[in-house]
Amino acid sequence: MKARVTVTLKTGILDPQGKAIEGALKSLGVDGVASVRQGKVFDIELAGADKAKAEAALKDAADRLLANTVIENYRVELLS
């Protein structure tokens, strides 16, 4: 089973890397960029077919390792 965990900064948390990307896009002439927030994506393959167990395991992994839940949110998607 394949899954994706997407981690992003919570609203209100400063994102200096996002600001740097925003400035770079504007300097490259990309029009219409209002703001940029950056994050992390983890593509994970799991053995087994139990979707409930997989989702629970991934949420536990995100809470304990993949995301700093004080300043970051995460989303778990089961892809197959």
Image (cartoon, grey):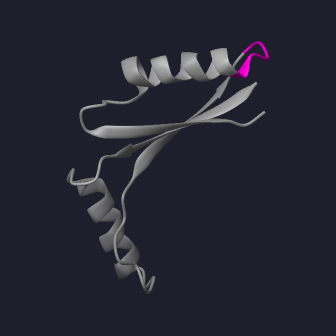
Q: Is residue 16 left or right of residue 40?
A: left
Prevalent SS, magenta region: loop
Q: Establish if 29 lies above or below 46.
A: below
Q: Dividing the picture into quarters, in which one does residue 28 lie?
A: bottom left
Q: Position of residue 47 (x, y in %)?
A: 75, 13
Q: Is residue 66 above or below residue 9?
A: above
Residue 59 in percent (x, y) is at 50, 23
Quarter of the image where the C terminus is located: top right
Q: Position of residue 65 (x, y in %)?
A: 39, 20
Query: Hey, which residue is sitting farthest front in the picture?
Result: 52
Magenta-drawn stretch contains 37 = no
Q: Quadrant of residue 4?
A: top right
75 left or right, relative to 66: right
Vertical position of residue 58 compared to residue 6: above or below: above
Range drawn in magenta: 47-51
Of residues 15 and 54, the one nearer the viewer is 54
Q: Which residue is rendered at x = 70% and y = 18% of the image? A: 46
Rendered residue at 35%/64% (across/down): 21
Which residue is painted at 21% across and 50% down in the image? 13
Residue 3 screen position, x and y as percent:
66, 31
